[in-house]
């Protein structure tokens, strides 16, 4: 593969192992020296492309890197029903499909990321966390620089080209850079990677779309602080919440990568339900926290206007059989406009044995329970999450959601 700066990538071997060989002109030796240092420093990260070594001759430097199967850009194009490729690209992608075989990136019934795609997205965040922990800023995060490797029965995403492209080419990357990179003289921090990450996550979730529009308009829209189009994720509140914060024009308002790693977008069903149950335990009826939680009711449940604006009652969306079954366990009954009481109901379903007729409605697994309530109250988790972040994030019962050992979770992937 020939790049615009004269760099060429070949398949090859190094110390008997298959590698990707990146050939770089000797005239760029001084420019890439810091990047080789970064490769060595980050070599043991499970979500960073491995660096095996380098060789030199009179004209070129040859970097031996871990060989991967494709990049994220090609993976999304390959499995997206919205993609249009020319014939030569289609042939390449079909060959790639034979290598990757059966891969499911989106759930067909709700068009949300599959567990595999969420894993790949989490891999990207974990790789970025590893770099930032070493005080390395990627500077050129984009789908083409995120490589995909097939590992036994799954896929793994790994970051590559930490700044090399930026130094070698004067052209830069169109559409993935933060506004402070595009505006001359702006101070740049690791926050530039978070902006790029927001665009990459949007790209994954939306089958290859971009929040700042068509290819030729992206940089202009980013530079001018034009409103991004997040309509494609408006029905996915966790994604909308995270991406909108990541692509904030103000770098100070973007989250840290550790906060992204712990965001509900990446929680599994068990974690999502556990968080709601812990919130139910934490909030005491009538206390100040209870009042703050109930202030989210109009957003979560919706409203209707008859004479005055009234909050809709959640029992209209929950099967009557479920309410009848759990009513005896609800001390004082349920107030159907109360978020706290909705959380109590969820807690009862999660913690108690369910009769067969209830199982037919909600299933028997965490995934079934979560799906039942998420489809009926899509804003419940993210609004409760924002409530906890505002009022009681530091409480002991919530530390496992915000302060768990990230280093251990990343090490477990390797």
Image (tube, rainbow, N blue to C red):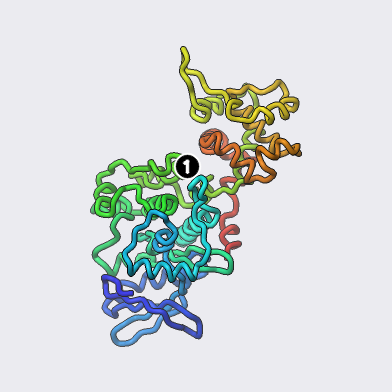
Residue 200 makes an appearance in the image: no
- Nearest to the observer: residue 267 or residue 91: 91
Q: Residue at x 41, y 79 (%)?
A: 11
Q: Residue at x 52, y 68 (%)?
A: 150
Q: Secondary structure at mark 1?
A: loop
Q: Residue at x 42, y 59 (%)?
A: 76
| Residue 257: % across, % down | 47, 52
| Residue 188: % across, % down | 33, 54
Residue furthest out toward the top: 307
Q: Quadrant of the N terminus?
A: bottom left
Q: Quadrant of the C terminus?
A: bottom right
- Nearest to the observer: residue 318 or residue 197: 318
Q: Which residue is mark 1?
A: 236
Q: Residue at x 36, y 76 (%)?
A: 9
- Nearest to the observer: residue 322 or residue 160: 322
Q: Quadrant of residue 321?
A: top right
Say whether residue 340 is left or right of residue 184: right
| Residue 45: % across, % down | 51, 66
Q: Label 1: how many residues lie within 10 Å, few (<14), some (14-19) or many (20+)?
A: some
Q: Is residue 288 above or below residue 306?
A: below
Q: Is residue 78 above or below residue 295?
A: below
Residue 92 makes an appearance in the image: yes
- Number of callouts: 1
Residue furthest out toward the bottom: 58
Say whether residue 47 is left or right of residue 363: left
- Nearest to the observer: residue 25 or residue 106: 106
| Residue 338: % across, % down | 59, 24
């Amino acid at each position: 593969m020939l790049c615009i700066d004269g760099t060429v990538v070949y398949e090859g071997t190094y110390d008997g192992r298959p590698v990707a060989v990146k050939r770089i002109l000797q005239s760029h030796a001084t420019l890439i020296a810091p990047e080789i240092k970064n490769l060595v420093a980050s070599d043991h990260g499970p979500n960073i492309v491995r660096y095996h070594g380098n060789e030199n001759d009179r004209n070129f430097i040859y970097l031996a890197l871990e060989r991967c199967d494709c990049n994220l850009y090609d993976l999304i194009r390959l499995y997206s029903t919205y993609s249009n490729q020319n014939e030569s690209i289609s042939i390449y992608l079909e060959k790639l499909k034979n290598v990757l075989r059966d891969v499911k990136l989106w759930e067909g019934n709700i068009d949300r990321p599959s567990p595999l795609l969420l894993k790949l997205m989490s891999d990207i965040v974990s790789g970025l966390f590893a770099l930032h922990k070493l005080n390395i800023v990627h500077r050129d995060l984009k789908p083409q620089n995120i490589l995909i490797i097939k590992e036994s029965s799954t896929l793994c995403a790994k970051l590559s080209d930490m700044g090399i492209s930026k130094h070698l080419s004067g052209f830069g990357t169109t559409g993935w850079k933060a506004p402070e990179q595009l505006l001359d003289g702006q101070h740049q921090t690791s926050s530039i990677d978070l902006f790029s990450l927001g665009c990459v996550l949007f790209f994954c979730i939306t089958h290859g779309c971009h929040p700042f529009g068509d290819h030729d308009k992206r940089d202009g829209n980013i530079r001018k602080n034009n409103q991004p189009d997040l309509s494609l994720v408006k029905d996915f509140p966790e994604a909308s919440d995270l991406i909108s914060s990541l692509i904030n024009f103000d770098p100070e308002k973007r989250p840290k990568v550790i906060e992204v790693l712990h965001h509900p977008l990446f929680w599994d069903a068990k974690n999502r339900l556990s968080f709601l149950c812990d919130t139910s335990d934490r909030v005491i009826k009538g206390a100040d926290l209870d009042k703050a939680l109930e202030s989210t009711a109009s957003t979560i449940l919706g409203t209707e206007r008859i004479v005055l604006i009234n909050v809709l009652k959640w029992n209209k969306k929950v099967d009557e059989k479920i309410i009848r079954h759990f009513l005896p366990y609800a001390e004082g009954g349920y107030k159907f406009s109360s978020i706290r009481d909705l959380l109590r109901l969820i807690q009862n379903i999660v913690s108690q044995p369910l009769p067969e007729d209830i199982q037919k409605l909600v299933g028997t697994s965490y995934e079934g329970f979560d799906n039942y309530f998420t489809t009926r109250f899509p804003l419940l988790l993210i609004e409760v999450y924002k409530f906890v972040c505002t009022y009681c994030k530091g409480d002991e019962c919530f530390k496992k959601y915000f302060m768990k050992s990230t280093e251990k979770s990343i090490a477990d992937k390797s």
